[in-house]
Image: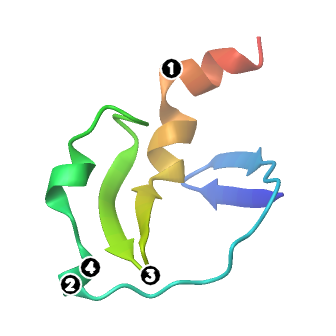
Amino acid sequence: VLVLNQDGLAAGFLVDEVLGYRRFVPEDQRPSMASSPAFQPWRLGAFHREGRNWLVLSLKKLARSELFIRAGH
C-alpha cells in the first residue's frame, strides 16, 4: 500500500508491483509524451529511459479529483 497523507487528505493506493527507484535527468524528459490522453489530468510529466517510457503521476491531484472521491461511494 502506498500511503498519501497531505493537507488533511489520507488515502491508500494498493499497488501490485514496484519496479524500483529511478532518477531522471533533464535529458530524459519527454514533454510530447506528457500531452497524451492517458491519466490526464493527473499526470505531471513523462520521461524516457532504459528503453521505456515512464509517466509521472500526481497522487495528490488524483486523490483530490471528483472521480477518486466518488469511487468509494
The amino acid marked with disc number 1 is Glu
Give the CA distance from mark 3 to mark 2.
14 Å
Q: Which mark is residue 26?
A: 2
Number of marks drawn: 4
Q: Is 70 on the left or on the right of 44, as rendered?
A: right
Q: Nearer the viewer, mark 3 or mark 4?
A: 3
Residue 11 image offset from top left, x and y in percent: 72, 46
The amino acid marked with disc number 4 is Asp
Residue 1 image offset from top left, x and y in percent: 84, 57
Identify the residue position indicated by label 4 in the image.
28
Q: In the rendered image, which quarter is residue 39 located in? A: top left
Give the CA distance from mark 4 to mark 2.
5 Å
The amino acid marked with disc number 3 is Glu
- The image shows residue 12, relative to residue 1, as above or below, that is above
Q: Nearer the viewer, mark 1 or mark 2?
A: 2
Give the CA distance from mark 3 to mark 4.
10 Å
- The image shows residue 1, relative to residue 8, as above or below, that is below
> Viewer-proximal residue, 11 or 25?
25
Residue at image x 34%, y 35%?
A: 41
The amino acid marked with disc number 2 is Pro
Q: Dot 2 surroundings within 10 Å: few (below 14), some, or many (20 or more)?
A: few
* Marked residue nearer the N-terminal end (3 or 4): 4
Q: Secondary structure at mark 1?
A: helix
Residue at image x 40%, y 35%?
A: 38
Q: Which mark is residue 66?
A: 1
